[in-house]
Image: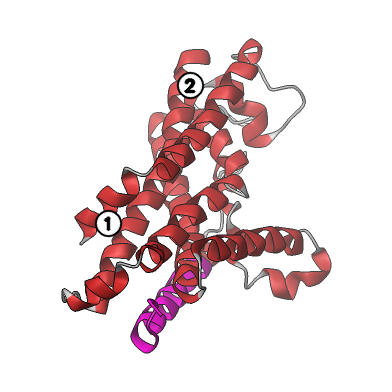
């Protein structure tokens, strides 16, 4: 089931377009700032200011730019499709008759969801790294206002940030997946997931709504960027808890929909 689901999704034009869009942003960004190679990017600070110093700098800056809005939207697109495609194509009832247990069907779809989410996240970092090597070269990771990171420090922080970003994207992917099972059509699930991301982003910008912000997984998505501050410290514990809780709740909701309601109806 997992192999069939992955093959079906990976060969779809929609998936290839999603990956191409994600790859285009770091590539275009690298070439647009080629003249700044080896220097600070204008007066910007943080990851964006240090982006032209090295390939790894550019890769992490690309992730920081794409993660708040574009990446979750493009992750939600295949997630909603994975959940709703069998019902919309009219093949879900045949899977039940095969017989394929609902638990096996859910596990296969969640497995495909995790693989596609990882591919989307790594696509940003990989293309950012390759474009950075071509334009800026391979140099030590530079932090504005602090010494360059050693190889070990760079590896630890980059891997930690990558894992945290992947966990964050899995949270919105599982939400879109649950909506894809619950709502009549995949486009409705995608629209709801996108509206959720946008609304959460707006709420996160209001200091008066702190009590609401702390329960939203999006509130913690950019916490990893503090790994690349001069202090080099980031409190990721609450973010990990929030993303994990969202994944568990959305997965339980998806399982409940499959067990209590016929999604093919």
Taking 148 as reference, is 194 above or below it?
below
Residue 254 located left or right of residue 205: left
Q: Nearer the viewer, residue 84 or 237?
A: 84
Q: Residues within 10 Å of mark 1 (few under 14, many from 20)?
A: some
The residue at which mark 1 appears reads as 5
User: In the displayed structure, does residue 162 sit left or right of residue 21?
Assistant: left
Left or right position of 174 against 217 = left
Residue sitting at the far top: 35
Q: Which residues are magenta?
A: 241-265
The residue sitting at 65% across, 10% down in the picture is 35
Image x and y of residue 229, in percent: 61, 41
Q: Which residue is mark 2?
A: 131
> Quick one: quadrant of the N terminus?
bottom left
Decide if residue 119 is in sight here: yes
Mark 1 element type = helix
Q: Nearer the viewer, mark 1 or mark 2?
A: 1
Residue at 52% x, 73% y: name it. 183
x and y, in percent, of residue 40 in the image:
68, 21
Q: Is 247 inside the magenta-drawn segment?
A: yes
Q: Callout 2: helix, strand or loop?
A: helix
Q: Is residue 59 above or below residue 203?
A: above
Magenta segment's dominant SS is helix
Residue shown at the point (47%, 38%) measured from the top left = 17
| Frontmost residue, 72 versus 36 | 72
Q: Position of residue 249 (x, y in %)?
A: 46, 77
């Amino acid at each position: 089931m997992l192999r069939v689901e992955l093959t079906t999704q990976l060969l779809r034009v929609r998936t290839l377009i999603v990956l191409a869009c994600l790859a285009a942003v770091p590539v275009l960004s690298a070439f647009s700032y080629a003249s700044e190679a080896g220097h600070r990017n204008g007066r910007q600070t943080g990851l964006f200011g240090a982006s032209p110093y090295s390939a790894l700098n550019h890769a992490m800056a690309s992730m920081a730019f794409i993660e708040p809005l574009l990446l979750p939207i493009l992750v939600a697109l295949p997630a909603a499709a994975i959940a709703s495609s069998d019902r919309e194509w009219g093949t879900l009832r045949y899977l039940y008759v095969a017989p394929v247990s609902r638990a096996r069907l859910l596990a296969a779809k969640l497995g495909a969801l995790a693989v596609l989410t990882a591919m989307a996240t790594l696509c940003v970092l990989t293309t950012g790294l390759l474009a950075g090597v071509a334009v800026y070269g391979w140099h030590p990771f530079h932090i504005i206002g602090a010494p360059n990171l050693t190889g070990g420090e760079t590896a630890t922080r980059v891997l930690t940030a990558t894992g945290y970003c992947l966990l964050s994207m899995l949270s919105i992917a599982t939400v879109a997946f649950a909506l894809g099972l619950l709502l009549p059509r995949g486009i409705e699930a995608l629209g709801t997931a996108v509206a959720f991301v946008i609304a959460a982003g707006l709420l996160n910008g209001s200091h008066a709504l702190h009590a609401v912000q702390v329960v939203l997984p999006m509130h913690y998505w950019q916490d990893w960027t503090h790994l690349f501050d001069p202090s080099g410290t980031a409190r990721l514990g609450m973010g990990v808890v929030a993303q994990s809780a969202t994944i568990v709740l959305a997965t339980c909701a998806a399982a409940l929909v499959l067990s209590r309601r016929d999604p093919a109806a």
